[in-house]
Amino acid sequence: MFSDFFETVFNLDNRLFRTLRDLFIPGELTNKYLAGKQRPFFQPLRLFFVSTVLMLSAHAILAVEKVGDKFNASIENARAGAYERAFASELSAKLDTIAMEYPGASNLALLDTIKARNPTTSSDSIRIGILNVKAYNDIQGEELAVAAVDFYTLSPQEIIALYEVTDWQSQYLVRQFYALMHSDSRAITNIMGQLIWGVVFLIPMSALMLKLIYIRRKRTYVEHLVFSLHVHALIFLLQALAAIVFYWFDTSVLLWATLPLTIVYFIGAQKRVYRQGWIKTLIKAWLLFIGYSVILSMAFGIGILASFLLF
């Protein structure tokens, strides 16, 4: 059993090593796969999802390590500040009542001293995006300004009742925003985990963009999809490795180096798979980078929106 295990895992000729070996050569794995040599390698979709999970997990751990404590501290400070403002406001009202019942000069001087030591600060407001649903075809986005004191001292249902939020869509948005802002560093891992929805959007759109750029090459959409899966798998593996190095050795050199490495790898893979001259390859690579920037922004937005709605 042990012999079979080590033979399977550490044999340099097994699927894992063959796949990684050819993946790190720009375009090599894609060319072999499209040529029909599929059994010796991992399926593109499986390879892509494994690399995606590794990348998102590594970056989630890194984000919690680097900014988790600051994120928790900012939430605690905001909550503490809200309670302090609530206490100061209630204290000021009590002191005004005492001043009316005991108007003596010495009493007023003492009350003024107490007020000076516990100043009532202005109540900051937290703005929550909600929907104004007038009809099924008339939906407008609005902002609900909630006093910070209320936001951190009341429950979501109490906020909804106090600020008269009626439609269920806006109530849902208030509850989700409340849960997100009252969470600790778990919110970071949740956001990173839900970014996979943006990645799912990213891949087919990238393949479609390749199809449009190389429309005269008569390649099928699936071929462009395989190329996109392989390229992104390599990029995500590099990102995972860079995040691990950053986490263990506290250096972001590899993280920054992944950007030029990714560009060089993509152009090399593009040249090798689509077999065009360098001038055409570089021009199309530039067009692809411009379009990809737009698609990447949309994918990131989808991931953030999914993390908010599914928190």
Image (cartoon, rainbow, N blue to C red):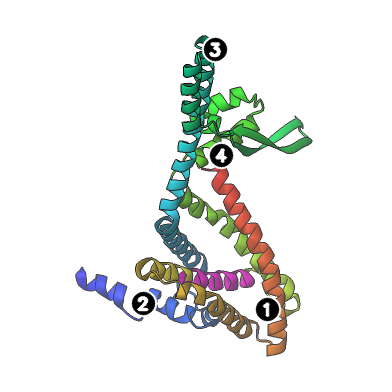
Which residue occupies the foreground of this view, 271 or 76?
76
Dot 3 or dot 4, earlier in sequence = 3
Element marked by disc 3: helix
The amino acid marked with disc number 4 is Phe
Does residue 153 show up?
A: yes
Which disc number belongs to residue 177? 4
Disc 3: CA contacts within 10 A as few (<14), some (14-19) or many (>=20): few
Say whether disc 2 or disc 1 marks the residue closer to the N-terminus. Answer: 2
Q: Which residue is mark 2?
A: 14
Q: Which residue is farthest left?
A: 2
Would you place residue 274 above or below residue 172 in this image?
below
Residue located beneath label 3 in the image: 100
Structural distance between the alpha carbons of marks 3 and 4? 42 Å
Kind of residue sitting beneath label 1: Ala
The magenta-colored residue range is 223-238
103 is within the stretch colored magenta: no
**Secondary structure found at label 2:** loop
Q: Position of residue 274 (x, y in %)?
A: 65, 82
In the depicted structure, whether residue 134 falls above or below residue 276:
above
> Is 39 left or right of 96, judged from the image as shown?
left
Q: Position of residue 273 (x, y in %)?
A: 61, 82
Give me the residue at 48% from left, 72% from top: 255
> Which of the two discs, 3 and 4, sits closer to the camera?
3
Q: Quadrant of residue 229?
A: bottom right
Please state which amino acid type lies under the numbered disc 2: Asn
Tag in front: 2 or 1: 1
Identify the residue at horizontal 51%, vertical 17% (top origin).
Answer: 105
State how far apart marks 3 and 2 are (Cα). Answer: 87 Å
The residue lying at 25 percent from left, 73 percent from top is 6
User: Outermost residue, top direction?
Assistant: 101
Instruction: Give the residue at mark 1.
Output: 285
Mark number for residue 207? none
